[in-house]
Image: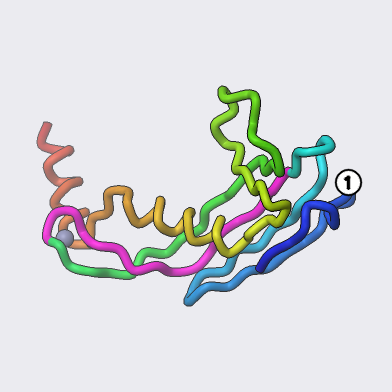
Amino acid sequence: MKIHFDKITQTPKPFVERQESVVFEGSLSKKETHRVHLVGTIEGVIEVQCDRCGILFDQSLSTPVKLTLSDQIAEDKEDLDIIEFLNGEIDISFILESEIVAEKSEYHYCNDCGKLEEAVEIEF
Ligand SMILES: [Zn+2]
């Protein structure tokens, strides 16, 4: 789903984006001339790989998302959460995909390895 920057006003505009078994729900509102705030949540189930034994398993997600979007190159480089959409279109599908990729790249342990991990922590 793509939403034009020009269509966003100060009144939050709700959106829902689905991808496989994940739902990204939230709203967009204009903060400044070239800044749009996105507030939402990603919920659902993604398939991740256990970092210890390598099996694939389902991981349920409930991730709050807060981003600032800009249709200009961000001058304030300290604000790392700014995503630039220089063609003036906010690509919600792209944001969701990036969040899923980020989530998948984190460490995950399957149930069995998770238990093992806890047991090791208790020993120390
Ligand atoms: Zn495992």
Q: Does the magenta run of residues contain 43? A: yes
Depicted 64 relative to depicted 13: above or below: above
Residue displayed at 65% across by 25% down: 75
Residue 10 placement (x, y as % from top left): 88, 46
Residue 8 appears at what percent x and percent y?
83, 53
- x and y, in percent, of residue 37 in the image: 73, 43
**Percent from the top left, x then y, of residue 102?**
40, 51
Please name whichever residue, 86 or 59, is drawn nearer the observer in this view of the structure.
86
Whether residue 56 sits left or right of residue 29 in the image: it is: left
Which residue is at a point 52% across and 73% down the rendered structure image? 19
84 left or right of 59 in image: right
Which residue carries the number 1 mark?
Answer: 10
* Amino acid at circle 1: Gln
Judged from the image, the secondary structure of the residue bearing numbered disc 1 is loop
Q: Main secondary structure of the magenta part?
A: strand
Q: Residue at x 71, y 44 (%)?
A: 71
Residue range (magenta): 37-53
